[in-house]
Amino acid sequence: YWQSKLQEVCRDAYVLVSFPPDGNSDQIFSEIVFAARPKAVVYISTTGVYGKAQGVIDECSAVDEDDPRAQLRLKSERIWASRAIVLRAPGLYSANSGLHRRLLSGSYRLPGDGSNFVSRIHLNDLAAIITKAFFSQSLLARPQTYVVGDLKPSTHLEVVTWLCQRLSLPLPPSSPLGEVNPSLRGNRQICSAKILADLEIELSYPTYVEGYTQCLANS
């Protein structure tokens, strides 16, 4: 019953797929979604597929096939990629969630010495990219995989210092890299030039400065 209802909802619709992979659900749901002949499908993946890769990352960068977490996500990507636009996103933040909230709660620990680079994108900017992708005839005619992120990848320490100054907080303690969440151990600088050029779109929050200024004003 639920399969037929889902197919009905997806028929001639714009479908956003953003659930985490579990090794089974993507195959089941993709068959239902594609059978409904939606107008467009966008699949949200993660820059975590680059695993231990360091430096500047773009669409030509090799993924980390040896990373177990990346393997599961890449399997899901391959299921959707034949007929969906795949967007590999870094950490998301908004007024209601993100680094500023963790600093205020006291739950944040600086990964290592904070010198690793991290990329991010404001939730509103990702939403704008998704919306533009849904209506891009060139992208829909030949679905591709893109990386997305803001224009200023920065070190953890730079962003944390900036936020702490504005929140009147001391710098948080640090934790060894091996003890923080795997998503915080990377050292990658995401280059989103291709998606921005292909969609002819400009970010409303091109760096963490504009993004977190908005977040702090609306928190």
Image (cartoon, rainbow, N blue to C red):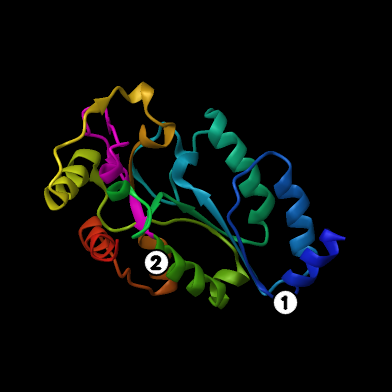
The residue under the point 67% across, 62% down is 83
Three-letter code, disc 1: Asp
- Which sits in the foreground, 133 or 131? 131
**Residue 158 placed where, x, y %?**
17, 44
Q: Quadrant of residue 177?
A: top left
Does label 2 or label 1 sit earlier along the sequence? 1
Q: Which quadrant of the view contains residue 137? A: bottom right
Q: Is residue 187 left or right of residue 161?
A: right
Q: Is residue 22 above or below residue 133?
A: above
Q: Which disc number belongs to residue 106?
A: none
Q: Give the magenta range.
A: 102-122
Q: Residues within 10 Å of mark 1 (few under 14, many from 20)?
A: few
Q: Is residue 177 magenta?
A: no
Nearest the eye: 136 or 163: 163
Q: How many marks?
A: 2
Residue 106 place in picture, x, y as percent: 28, 38
Q: Position of residue 88 (x, y in %)?
A: 48, 52
Q: Residue at x 72, y 46 (%)?
A: 25
Q: Which mark is residue 124?
A: 2
Observer-side mark, 2 or 1, equals 2
Label 2, label 1: how many angstroms apart (C-alpha)? 25 Å
Q: Amino acid at mark 2?
A: Asn
Q: Quadrant of the N terminus?
A: bottom right
According to the picture, the residue beneath numbered tag 1 turns out to be: 12
